[in-house]
Image (cartoon, rainbow, N blue to C red):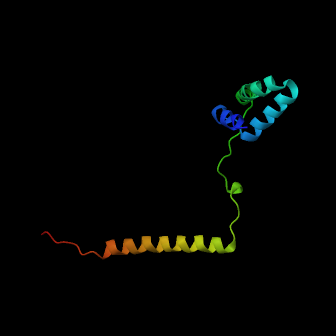
Amino acid sequence: MLTPPLSARTMQLHPAVAFGSVIVGVTLLGPVGALLALPITATVQAVVSSYVQRHELIESELLKEPMSTRQQARVDAEEELDAEAEVDSEDVEDDEPFSATT
């Protein structure tokens, strides 16, 4: 019972896939099938993953979950505070006296 999760971790198989493959291996070939199930499954997974094209998701506004009105209000308030902080920092820089070196 300990071998499938341990072997699955080293072969990068999901534990459910490992248990399923061991059960199928025992059903088809008995104890020998149980021993050969994980290597065969890992080999099949490697072959399939090298020939099957995987698609990457791109960042898009359509993929974002909509915010509740409360969350949106919080984001808007944070943006307003950031904008006010930028304006205040610009005002402080403008109010500094100039040093006369003449």
Q: Quarter of the image holding residue 56?
A: top right
Question: Residue 41, position in %: x, y?
Answer: 75, 29
> Which of the two residues, 53 or 79, is positioned nearer the viewer here?
53
> Which of the two residues, 51 or 39, is positioned nearer the viewer here?
39
> What residue sits 72% from the left and 28% below the top?
42
Q: In the current view of this chain or complex, which residue is farthest to the left?
A: 102
Q: Quarter of the image holding residue 31?
A: top right
Question: Residue 35, position in %: x, y?
Answer: 75, 26
Q: Does residue 23 lie above or below 63 as drawn? A: above
> What residue sits 19% from the left and 72% below the top?
99
> What residue sits 38% from the left and 71% below the top?
90
Question: Residue 86, position in %: x, y?
Answer: 43, 70
Q: In the current view of this chain or complex, which residue is farthest to the right?
A: 28
Q: Does residue 59 lie above or below 48 as drawn? A: below
Q: Quarter of the image holding residue 3?
A: top right
Question: Residue 79, position in %: x, y?
Answer: 54, 70
Q: Dividing the image into 4 quarters, which one contains the C terminus?
A: bottom left
Q: Does residue 82 lie above or below 65 as drawn? A: below
> What residue sits 24% from the left and 75% below the top?
97
